Amino acid sequence: MKIHFDFDTKHFESSEAVVVAAYAKKDGGVQLSWSDAQLKKEFAMAKSSKNFKAAAGTTYGFTCSRMSDVIVIGMGEKTKAKAEGIRRATAAALQAVSGNKYNSVAIDAASFNAINKLAETASLINEALIMTGYKFDKYFKEAQKESFKDICIYVSDKKVKKQIEKVEESSRNLADSVNFCRDLVNEAPNVLHSEEYAKRVEKDVKTALKGKGVKVKIMGKADLKKENMNLFLSVNAASAYEPRLVHLTYTPKKVTKNTKHYALVGKGLTFDTGGYSLKPGGSMMGMKFDMGGSATVYGAFRAAVLNNSPYKITCILGMTDNAVSATGTTPDSIVKGRNGLTVEILNTDAEGRLVLADCLDYACDQKPDYIIDAATLTGACLVALGSQVCAVLGNDDKFVKQVQDSAKAQDEYMWQLPIIPEWREDMKSKIADLKNIGTPARAGTATAAAFLENFIKDDIKWAHLDIAGVCDSQSHLPYCPPKGASGLMVRSLHKLLNG
């Protein structure tokens, strides 16, 4: 599907299908802000249009005099329609025209402009089209055919043409990075093991991010041993594949002593059996998603770099699987982390925090001002917040609020959970410095964060995102696939990294 912007009415008028938005009026009528006056007349003349109230998410169709199909997308009351409403309405529009054999489709951007910022509206439409059009279909014997090849975003006001040219590229970069994240998370675990995962990230950096000032360093088992990353290595002990730590560094063209430095850290468990604390069979399905944190931070890093972030950004991805074999780490083991703290491993299925612990300590040595880690870390997160809200915890409330504000600006749900002294105490072992699980069935998301906090040093401001609930299967969002990776939180982190 090719998407292009157009300021010429001939493409809009010659399209086989035209998509316009409508708003609900309090008196039960419909408010139309369409660029084409003739379409307004024909809509009013259609008898059945009187039954269409333009409620959010509803659609209505008719054929106009020039034989184009017209699809009207309801957006609810205009005063209540925000950026997220534009995304969802665009997704509904694409779904409405999909399956029909149109050679070309045109979307009237002005009709969707509920926020009275036409360039931003066009950007949101472009972003939503790319995200909604995503498919992970590489393993079908026969490729799924697209219902149409060309979609035009028609902008009636030529005064915003220069603005559109800027936002077209930035919105495409962001949406493409969301989809790249989805591709990584959806990939089969027998294909995307740690060694392959590192190769794919390296390849993408050298192609998509070529010339953007990104340096790549890939560390294997021998390198991790030299770094004393024994917690990370303990998770990899049973694997048939070497672990990988991918270290990416982006430096903007203009750097001063005041340039902020962000470090992103991601859990990259390409498959999690639970290790010797073996998961039940039903709980093991979907564990390919356990590398979602690393894919999320890489997606955000990718988008931020493509859109020329003014900040220095370090991205650390810790990659391994958690398997079972004779060489695997057993419960009751005690392992020393990179920072010298010893950890009593009471449950090998609480492995993500072990990988993150060493990666966070390594990230601290890069001297960032801020660290953000993302991980599908705890099932407890779903108990606390359900499957639609990301948990955020940290050591600095002001910084946590900045992260939350970025999520709010992108209409992604995020809620802060506390780390209290009692939970920090709960993570102490009686025979080592720490243990890797807290009291069972007690604040599991927060105690996991309390464990990770021990690996943040030098007063670095830190935020931890537990994306266990939001990483996949966000069927309530029409621009997300109903099953599989969502790509959520890429947009939130991109917002933070690009201001």
Image: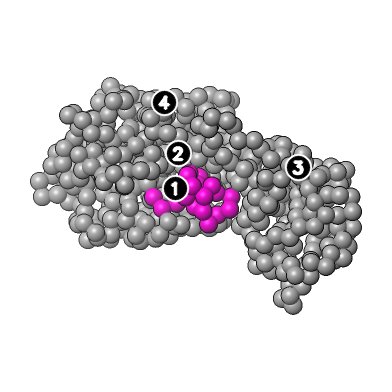
Using the image, tell me which numbered label, if any, was put on residue 196. Answer: 4
Question: Residue flagged by tag 2: what amino acid is it?
Answer: Val
Nearer the observer: mark 2 or 3; the answer is: 3
Using the image, tell me which numbered label, if any, was put on residue 471. Answer: 1
Q: Residues within 10 Å of mark 4 (few under 14, many from 20)?
A: some
- On the image, which quarter does residue 358 sit in? top left
The residue pinned by badge 3 equals 102
The residue pinned by badge 2 equals 185
Gap in Å between the C-alphas at discs 1 and 2?
9 Å
- The percent coordinates of residue 243 (x first, y second) are 32, 28
Q: Nearer the viewer, residue 88 or 312?
A: 88
Whether residue 247 appears in this view of the structure is no
Gap in Å between the C-alphas at discs 2 and 3?
32 Å
Residue extending furthest toward the top: 222
Gap in Å between the C-alphas at discs 1 and 3?
33 Å
Gap in Å between the C-alphas at discs 1 and 4?
21 Å
> Element at badge 2?
helix
Question: Residue flagged by tag 4: what amino acid is it?
Answer: Glu
Q: Residues within 10 Å of mark 1 (few under 14, many from 20)?
A: many
Q: Nearer the viewer, residue 218 or 17?
A: 17
Closer to the chain start, of discs 1 and 4, is 4
Q: Is residue 478 magenta?
A: yes
- The percent coordinates of residue 482 (x first, y second) are 52, 50
Q: Residues within 10 Å of mark 2 (few under 14, many from 20)?
A: many
Q: Contact, CB < 8 Å: mark 1 with mark 2?
A: yes
Closer to the chain start, of discs 1 and 3, is 3
Question: Residue flagged by tag 3: what amino acid is it?
Answer: Tyr
